[in-house]
Image (cartoon, helix red, strand yellow):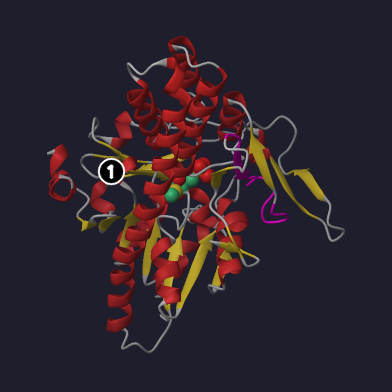
Amino acid sequence: MKVKGVAYRTIWVNGDGWSVGIIDQTKLPHAFVTTNLTSWEEAAHAIKAMIVRGAPLIGATGAYGLALAMRADPSDAMLEKAHTVINETRPTAINLKWALDRVRNALHNQPTSSRAAIAYQVAAEIADDDVATCSSIGDHGLKIIDALYEKAGRKRTINILTHCNAGWLATVDWGTAIAPIYKAHDAGIPVHVWVDETRPRNQGASLTAWELNSHGVPHTVIVDNAGGHLMQHGSVDMCIVGTDRTTREGDVCNKIGTYLKALAAHDNGVPFYVALPHSTIDWTIRDGVKEIPIEERAQEEVTVMSGRTSDGEIVPVTITPEGSKAANFGFDVTPARLVTGLITERGVCAASEAGLTKLYPEFA
Ligand code: MRU
């Protein structure tokens, strides 16, 4: 996507041929800053500290992390160590393990002299595949938005609610949930997006709003609890969210609060779609509530908020009484029965094993 007229992906190899460029997402929306990863430890830190985040992007970053590790030391011991440490940085999004395994499998039985080059090559393939995959998700999702526009007589704006950030910043480019919105907007369909702020880290207010603003897509930021009210009043035509792990039976794990949006959508007859690439499907599990590990993060993400003052200074502010504990669950699981459809790069399917395996027969 373009930032002030310049085309960016969220991760790239620099002109030196080895260091890896990323956008520091902790600085947005106040500043657009890029930074470099020069070691696998820096890649692991960038994922853990959420300098990069979003399931597909942490997968691509993990893959480049292994490439940086192989450049430093192409031994089996280093491969295993970097794989383990990077994989443990964030437990919920399966894309991370998927990408790390893909690089490790490609290096199996390869001479140490060629391991770094192979790892960079596979990481580049993962990144390129993600761009093509997300673009296809956008094309399939566009058809759903267009059908809603048709149903509305092509006369009025289509209102879409999204949660967290599943835009281009969460992937290598395009995004998952936001890709159909970009494609609809670019095709001239009037869309307006209700952006859940997404406490505690505010990925909606800070990142989704920044993306949509940069691309000129009309949007309004709302507090996380507003969605149900808007749906009751007919102000939401559809919800689209991303996912960090989807089970083979179609249960969907995504940013905390997604489940409550799905319940409200179900109660109000609002279609609730989930957009995902193949790398987000965990074919080894069935029951999302029982089997998906939910990341728990620091209390301070809940008790302390930061924002920009009118002087441009970023200041942290504590919002809870001293002594109050906070719990910070990063994700929740929306059962398949609440999902209208899964938008994948291969098409749209029911959130069920039958639906998914029809699109991905190799996993039947
Ligand atoms: O904690 P984050 O910011 O990494 O969470 C991101 C999300 O929950 C996204 O919705 C998800 O990764 C799908 S993104 C394409």
Question: Does the magenta portion include 26?
Answer: yes
Rendered residue at 50%/67% (across/down): 194
- Magenta residues, dominant SS class: loop
118 or 292: which is nearer to us?
118
Q: Amino acid at mark 1?
A: Asp
Q: Which residue is mark 1?
A: 251
Q: Is residue 120 above or below residue 354?
A: above
Q: Is 277 included in the stretch rendered in magenta?
A: no
In the image, 49: left or right of 341? right
The answer to which quarter of the image holds residue 201 is: top right
Relative to residue 202, is residue 244 drawn left or right? left
- Label 1 Cα neighbours within 10 Å, binned few <14 / some 14-19 / many ≥20: many
Q: Which residues are magenta?
A: 18-32
Q: Position of residue 39 (x, y in %)?
A: 61, 26
User: Which of the pair 140/120 is nearer the observer?
Assistant: 120
Q: Secondary structure at mark 1?
A: loop
